[in-house]
Amino acid sequence: MAASKLQAFWNHPAGPKTIHFWAPTFKWGISIANVADFTKPPEKLSYPQQIAVTCTGVIWTRYSTVITPKNWNLFSVNVAMAGTGIYQLSRKIK
C-alpha cells in the first residue's frame, strides 16, 4: 500500500521528477527568510523587495489554482509569500 502511494507520488505530473515540484520548494526559502526578517527593524526593510514578494505571492496564488494539474505546494508557498510580504509592508508603512 505504501509503495503504491509512493509510486503514485513519484509519477504524478507535478511530482519530484518535474520543475513544477522543485520551483515552489525553493520559494519556501524566500518565505522562511522573510519570516526571519520579522525581528529586523522596519527601517532596514526594503520597499522594492517586499513589494516584489507580495506581488509574486498574490499573482501566483491565483495562477496556481488555474493551472492543471493543481499544484498545492505552489499555492501554499505563494499564500505564505503574500502573507509575509503584506505583514512586512504594513510594518514598514507604520
Image (spheres, helix red, strand yellow):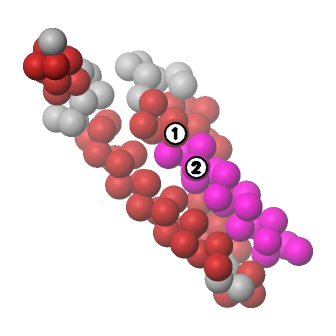
Q: Secondary structure at mark 2?
A: helix
- Residue occupied by mark 2: 80
10 Å crowding of disc 1: few (<14), some (14-19), many (20+): some
Instruction: Please report the residue visible at 42 percent of the width from the left and 37 percent of the height from the top.
Output: 73
**Residue contact between numbered discs 1 and 2, judged by CB atoms under 8 Å:** yes
Who is closer to the viewer here, 67 or 42? 42
Badge 2 amino acid:
Ala
Which residues, given as a range, are shown in magenta? 77-94
Q: Is residue 68 above or below residue 28?
A: above
Instruction: Please report the residue visible at 65 percent of the width from the left and 83 percent of the height from the top.
Output: 40
Instruction: Please report the residue visible at 54 percent of the width from the left and 72 percent of the height from the top.
Output: 36
Is 57 on the left or on the right of 43, as rendered? left
The quadrant in which the C terminus is found is bottom right
Is 7 on the left or on the right of 64, as rendered? left
Is 72 on the left or on the right of 90, as rendered? left
Answer whether residue 60 is visible to the viewer in this image. no
Return the x and y of residue 24 as percentages of the image width and height: 39, 46
Specify the label residue 76 is tagged with: 1
